Image (spheres, rainbow, N blue to C red):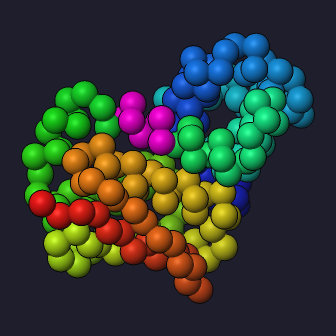
Amino acid sequence: MSTSPQLSQAILADQMTILRAELGESVHQAAISKLEPADREALNGLAAMGWCDINLAKRYKDSVADEVGKSSLELQRWIVKLAVGRTVGGFWRVLLSQVWDDALVKRVPILYQRTFDVGVMSAKFDGAGSATMTVTGWPRIPEYDLVGLQVGVESILQLLGREGASAQASRTPDGVVYKVRWKTK
Protein backbone atom coordinates (compact mmCIF):
# COMPACT_ATOMS: atom_id res chain seq x y z
CA MET A 1 0.00 0.00 0.00
CA SER A 2 1.41 3.37 -1.01
CA THR A 3 1.65 6.17 1.52
CA SER A 4 1.73 8.77 -1.24
CA PRO A 5 -1.50 10.54 -2.18
CA GLN A 6 -3.37 8.72 -4.92
CA LEU A 7 -5.22 9.86 -8.05
CA SER A 8 -8.08 8.00 -9.68
CA GLN A 9 -6.76 5.76 -12.44
CA ALA A 10 -9.85 6.64 -14.50
CA ILE A 11 -8.98 10.36 -14.33
CA LEU A 12 -5.42 9.76 -15.52
CA ALA A 13 -6.57 7.34 -18.24
CA ASP A 14 -9.05 9.94 -19.50
CA GLN A 15 -6.36 12.62 -19.54
CA MET A 16 -4.05 10.28 -21.45
CA THR A 17 -6.79 9.64 -24.02
CA ILE A 18 -7.30 13.38 -24.48
CA LEU A 19 -3.56 14.02 -24.78
CA ARG A 20 -3.28 11.32 -27.46
CA ALA A 21 -6.23 12.78 -29.38
CA GLU A 22 -5.07 16.39 -29.10
CA LEU A 23 -1.30 15.99 -29.45
CA GLY A 24 -0.98 12.73 -31.35
CA GLU A 25 0.11 9.19 -30.64
CA SER A 26 3.73 10.02 -31.50
CA VAL A 27 3.93 12.62 -28.71
CA HIS A 28 2.39 10.15 -26.25
CA GLN A 29 4.80 7.38 -27.26
CA ALA A 30 7.83 9.69 -27.08
CA ALA A 31 6.77 10.87 -23.61
CA ILE A 32 6.20 7.30 -22.42
CA SER A 33 9.58 6.17 -23.76
CA LYS A 34 11.38 8.68 -21.50
CA LEU A 35 9.85 7.22 -18.34
CA GLU A 36 11.26 4.48 -16.13
CA PRO A 37 10.10 0.94 -16.97
CA ALA A 38 8.00 0.76 -13.78
CA ASP A 39 6.16 3.95 -14.78
CA ARG A 40 5.54 2.63 -18.30
CA GLU A 41 4.16 -0.59 -16.86
CA ALA A 42 1.90 1.26 -14.42
CA LEU A 43 0.56 3.54 -17.17
CA ASN A 44 -0.15 0.54 -19.42
CA GLY A 45 -2.09 -1.10 -16.58
CA LEU A 46 -4.48 1.76 -15.78
CA ALA A 47 -8.04 0.65 -15.13
CA ALA A 48 -11.46 2.24 -14.77
CA MET A 49 -11.29 1.56 -11.03
CA GLY A 50 -8.48 2.01 -8.57
CA TRP A 51 -5.81 4.51 -7.67
CA CYS A 52 -2.32 5.47 -8.84
CA ASP A 53 0.39 7.62 -7.28
CA ILE A 54 -0.06 11.34 -8.00
CA ASN A 55 3.64 11.47 -8.81
CA LEU A 56 3.19 8.95 -11.64
CA ALA A 57 0.59 11.25 -13.22
CA LYS A 58 2.91 14.23 -12.85
CA ARG A 59 5.91 12.40 -14.30
CA TYR A 60 3.87 11.35 -17.34
CA LYS A 61 2.38 14.80 -17.92
CA ASP A 62 5.77 16.45 -17.35
CA SER A 63 7.21 14.19 -20.03
CA VAL A 64 4.40 15.18 -22.41
CA ALA A 65 4.98 18.86 -21.56
CA ASP A 66 8.66 18.44 -22.37
CA GLU A 67 7.77 16.86 -25.72
CA VAL A 68 5.54 19.79 -26.75
CA GLY A 69 7.61 22.60 -25.23
CA LYS A 70 5.17 23.62 -22.49
CA SER A 71 5.84 24.16 -18.81
CA SER A 72 4.56 21.56 -16.39
CA LEU A 73 1.86 23.82 -14.93
CA GLU A 74 0.84 25.12 -18.37
CA LEU A 75 0.14 21.57 -19.56
CA GLN A 76 -1.63 20.75 -16.26
CA ARG A 77 -3.97 23.74 -16.65
CA TRP A 78 -4.69 22.85 -20.27
CA ILE A 79 -5.37 19.13 -19.77
CA VAL A 80 -7.50 19.60 -16.64
CA LYS A 81 -9.69 22.12 -18.45
CA LEU A 82 -10.16 19.77 -21.42
CA ALA A 83 -10.83 16.75 -19.20
CA VAL A 84 -13.40 18.61 -17.09
CA GLY A 85 -15.10 19.70 -20.31
CA ARG A 86 -15.47 16.05 -21.34
CA THR A 87 -16.69 14.98 -17.92
CA VAL A 88 -19.23 17.76 -17.49
CA GLY A 89 -20.24 17.91 -21.15
CA GLY A 90 -23.50 16.75 -22.65
CA PHE A 91 -26.28 15.56 -20.38
CA TRP A 92 -24.62 16.60 -17.10
CA ARG A 93 -23.99 20.08 -18.43
CA VAL A 94 -27.64 20.60 -19.32
CA LEU A 95 -28.88 19.05 -16.09
CA LEU A 96 -26.50 20.81 -13.70
CA SER A 97 -26.68 24.20 -15.40
CA GLN A 98 -30.29 24.33 -14.19
CA VAL A 99 -29.27 23.77 -10.56
CA TRP A 100 -29.16 26.82 -8.28
CA ASP A 101 -25.76 28.03 -7.14
CA ASP A 102 -25.95 26.71 -3.58
CA ALA A 103 -26.78 23.17 -4.74
CA LEU A 104 -24.10 23.24 -7.43
CA VAL A 105 -21.38 24.38 -5.02
CA LYS A 106 -22.26 21.54 -2.64
CA ARG A 107 -21.79 18.98 -5.43
CA VAL A 108 -18.21 19.96 -6.35
CA PRO A 109 -16.70 18.01 -3.38
CA ILE A 110 -18.23 14.81 -4.79
CA LEU A 111 -15.91 15.14 -7.80
CA TYR A 112 -12.96 15.72 -5.47
CA GLN A 113 -13.57 12.48 -3.54
CA ARG A 114 -13.69 10.59 -6.85
CA THR A 115 -10.41 12.16 -7.95
CA PHE A 116 -8.11 11.92 -4.89
CA ASP A 117 -7.86 9.45 -2.00
CA VAL A 118 -6.41 12.00 0.39
CA GLY A 119 -8.11 14.74 2.35
CA VAL A 120 -11.66 15.98 2.16
CA MET A 121 -13.13 18.89 0.24
CA SER A 122 -16.00 20.85 1.72
CA ALA A 123 -17.88 23.66 0.04
CA LYS A 124 -19.86 26.57 1.42
CA PHE A 125 -22.05 28.88 -0.63
CA ASP A 126 -21.24 32.36 0.69
CA GLY A 127 -23.88 34.29 -1.24
CA ALA A 128 -24.55 35.52 -4.76
CA GLY A 129 -21.50 34.78 -6.91
CA SER A 130 -19.32 33.56 -4.06
CA ALA A 131 -18.29 30.30 -2.43
CA THR A 132 -15.50 28.88 -0.31
CA MET A 133 -14.10 25.43 -1.04
CA THR A 134 -11.72 23.95 1.50
CA VAL A 135 -9.46 20.91 1.26
CA THR A 136 -8.40 19.55 4.64
CA GLY A 137 -6.26 16.56 5.46
CA TRP A 138 -3.67 17.28 2.76
CA PRO A 139 -1.23 19.66 4.49
CA ARG A 140 1.50 19.57 1.85
CA ILE A 141 -0.61 19.45 -1.28
CA PRO A 142 1.81 19.84 -4.20
CA GLU A 143 1.54 23.02 -6.27
CA TYR A 144 0.77 20.85 -9.30
CA ASP A 145 -2.36 19.39 -7.69
CA LEU A 146 -3.33 22.69 -6.06
CA VAL A 147 -3.36 24.25 -9.55
CA GLY A 148 -5.17 21.25 -11.04
CA LEU A 149 -7.95 21.59 -8.46
CA GLN A 150 -8.14 25.34 -9.01
CA VAL A 151 -8.58 24.91 -12.77
CA GLY A 152 -11.03 22.06 -12.20
CA VAL A 153 -13.26 24.16 -9.94
CA GLU A 154 -13.15 27.13 -12.32
CA SER A 155 -13.89 24.96 -15.34
CA ILE A 156 -16.83 23.14 -13.74
CA LEU A 157 -18.48 26.40 -12.75
CA GLN A 158 -17.83 28.08 -16.11
CA LEU A 159 -19.16 25.09 -18.05
CA LEU A 160 -22.29 25.13 -15.92
CA GLY A 161 -23.04 28.75 -16.74
CA ARG A 162 -21.26 30.59 -13.92
CA GLU A 163 -19.66 33.24 -16.12
CA GLY A 164 -16.22 34.51 -15.12
CA ALA A 165 -15.74 31.86 -12.44
CA SER A 166 -12.35 32.14 -10.76
CA ALA A 167 -10.80 30.46 -7.74
CA GLN A 168 -8.02 31.98 -5.64
CA ALA A 169 -6.03 29.48 -3.60
CA SER A 170 -4.56 30.07 -0.16
CA ARG A 171 -2.58 27.40 1.63
CA THR A 172 -3.53 26.48 5.18
CA PRO A 173 -1.66 24.31 7.71
CA ASP A 174 -4.00 21.42 6.80
CA GLY A 175 -4.56 21.96 3.06
CA VAL A 176 -5.90 24.77 0.91
CA VAL A 177 -8.83 27.17 0.73
CA TYR A 178 -10.27 28.34 -2.58
CA LYS A 179 -12.20 31.59 -2.58
CA VAL A 180 -14.45 31.22 -5.61
CA ARG A 181 -16.22 34.06 -7.40
CA TRP A 182 -18.41 34.34 -10.50
CA LYS A 183 -20.62 36.95 -12.13
CA THR A 184 -24.22 37.02 -10.99
CA LYS A 185 -27.16 37.58 -13.29
The single residue placed furthest to the top in the displayed view is: 25
> Residue 159: where, in percent of width, then height?
30, 43
> Could you tell me how many numbered marks the image carries?
0
User: Relative to 174, is 177 on the left or the right?
Assistant: left
Residue occupying image coordinates x 29% and y 72%: 131
> Residue 7: where, in percent of width, then height?
58, 48
Q: Nearer the viewer, residue 130 or 115?
A: 130
The range drawn in magenta is: 81-87
User: Relative to 154, is 95 on the left or the right?
Assistant: left
Q: Nearer the viewer, residue 7 or 98?
A: 98
Residue 135 part of the magenta-drawn span = no
Q: Is residue 40 visible?
A: no
> Residue 137: where, in percent of width, then height?
53, 74
Residue occupying image coordinates x 75% and y 46%: 71
Main secondary structure of the magenta stretch: helix
Q: Is residue 108 visible?
A: yes
Q: Quadrant of residue 107?
A: bottom left
> Residue 168: where, in percent of width, then height?
47, 71
User: Relative to 29, is 163 on the left or the right?
Assistant: left
